[in-house]
């Protein structure tokens, strides 16, 4: 078996506790021959458990040193792809499958990766990932809290979010400096249907662009002063509010009114 060193640049912290691995797999509720994506399999401790579940497993590993290690260990029992998950065209791998993601995600790709998941939310039946605890709390945050933001709103727009459990640093090698957490995402059956989701998220992004500023100020990026005055007279959302005080329903109303003024 080839040897390798962990790469700090890739945020590699290898899980070493098999009990945690089993708990993660249990939360995934894997059925035989179900298509699973694992991102950053590392030394393969979770990979082994996913194979024990008789899944149809695809692993994405960016590390050119780990790739031959994993291939030597698992051979053709997994579909091993030596690519950056953030740079590939997901449509080439999604096809018409309903997929589950089960992974210990590298910290630095967590937010961009989860945003990519929302772009293809209809393809994923369940997502069980271990991430930095702080990010897990942001994803699960409620309106008006310090952790509530675009990430919270976007993940909760597409998925029901459940906090699984906390994982302490000593269960990894090398140990990270912070706690980790496992979260479970399942697709919402009551997801709002919008005519222009892209523009909705543009409004959300602008609203959160400067958390200290009121909506009236932040919306200047997409509306003129005159249009903002008009918006204030027709919208039920007070433009003196800040983005973190708006619920999903509030944001939808704001988006609809802004969209009318844009057309």
Image (spheres, helix red, strand yellow):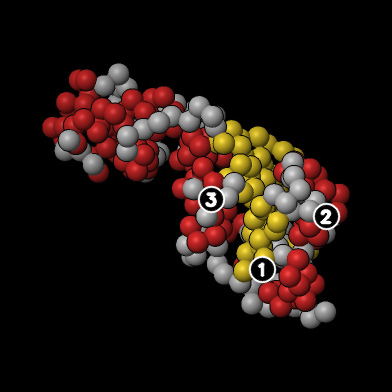
Residue at (76, 66) in percent of width and height: 77
Sequence-wise, which precedes: disc 3 or disc 2? 2
Q: CA distance from mark 3 to mark 2?
A: 25 Å
* Horizontal side of residue 158 vs 70, given as left or right: left
Sequence-wise, which precedes: disc 1 or disc 3? 1
Q: Nearer the viewer, mark 1 or mark 3?
A: 3
**Residue 172: where, in percent of width, then height?**
78, 58
Task: Name the residue carrying label 1.
Answer: 80
**Residue 59: where, in percent of width, then height?**
66, 63
Residue 129 drawn above or below residue 187:
below
In this view of the protein, which residue sits in the foreground, 103 or 222?
103
Q: Say how many tags the image has.
A: 3
In this view of the protein, which residue sits in the foreground, 20 or 36?
36
Q: Secondary structure at mark 2?
A: helix
Residue at (17, 35) in percent of width and height: 263
Answer yes or no: is residue 169 visible. Answer: no
Q: CA distance from mark 1 to mark 3?
A: 20 Å
**Residue 97: where, in percent of width, then height?**
58, 50
Sequence-wise, which precedes: disc 2 or disc 1? 2
Task: Name the residue carrying label 3.
Answer: 96
* Horizontal side of residue 206 vs 231, given as left or right: right
Location of residue 14 by image quarter: bottom right
Task: Name the residue carrying label 2.
Answer: 52
User: Quadrant of the image for the N terminus?
Assistant: bottom right
């Amino acid at each position: 078996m080839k040897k390798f060193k962990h790469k700090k640049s890739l945020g590699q912290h290898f899980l070493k506790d098999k009990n945690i691995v089993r708990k993660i797999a249990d939360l995934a509720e894997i059925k035989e021959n179900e298509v699973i994506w694992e991102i950053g399999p590392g030394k393969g401790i979770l990979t082994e458990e996913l194979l024990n579940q008789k899944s149809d497993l695809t692993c994405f590993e960016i590390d050119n040193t780990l790739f031959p290690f994993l291939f030597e260990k698992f051979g053709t029992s997994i579909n091993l792809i030596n690519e950056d998950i953030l740079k590939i065209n997901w449509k080439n791998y999604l096809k018409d499958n309903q997929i589950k993601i089960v992974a210990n995600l590298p910290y630095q790709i967590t937010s961009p990766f989860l945003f990519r998941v929302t772009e293809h939310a209809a393809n994923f039946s369940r997502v069980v990932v271990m991430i930095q605890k702080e990010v897990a709390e942001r994803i699960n945050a409620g309106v008006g809290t310090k952790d509530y933001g675009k990430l919270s709103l976007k993940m909760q727009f597409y998925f029901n979010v459940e906090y699984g459990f906390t994982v302490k640093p000593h269960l990894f090698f090398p140990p990270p400096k912070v706690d980790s957490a496992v979260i479970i995402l399942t697709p919402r059956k009551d997801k709002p249907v919008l005519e222009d989701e892209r523009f909705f998220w543009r409004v959300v992004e602008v609203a959160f662009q400067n958390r200290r500023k009121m909506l009236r100020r932040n919306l200047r990026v997409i509306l003129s002063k005159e249009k903002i005055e008009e918006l204030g007279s027709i919208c039920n959302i007070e433009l003196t509010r800040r983005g973190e005080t708006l619920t999903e329903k509030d944001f939808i109303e704001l988006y609809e009114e802004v969209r009318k003024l844009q057309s």
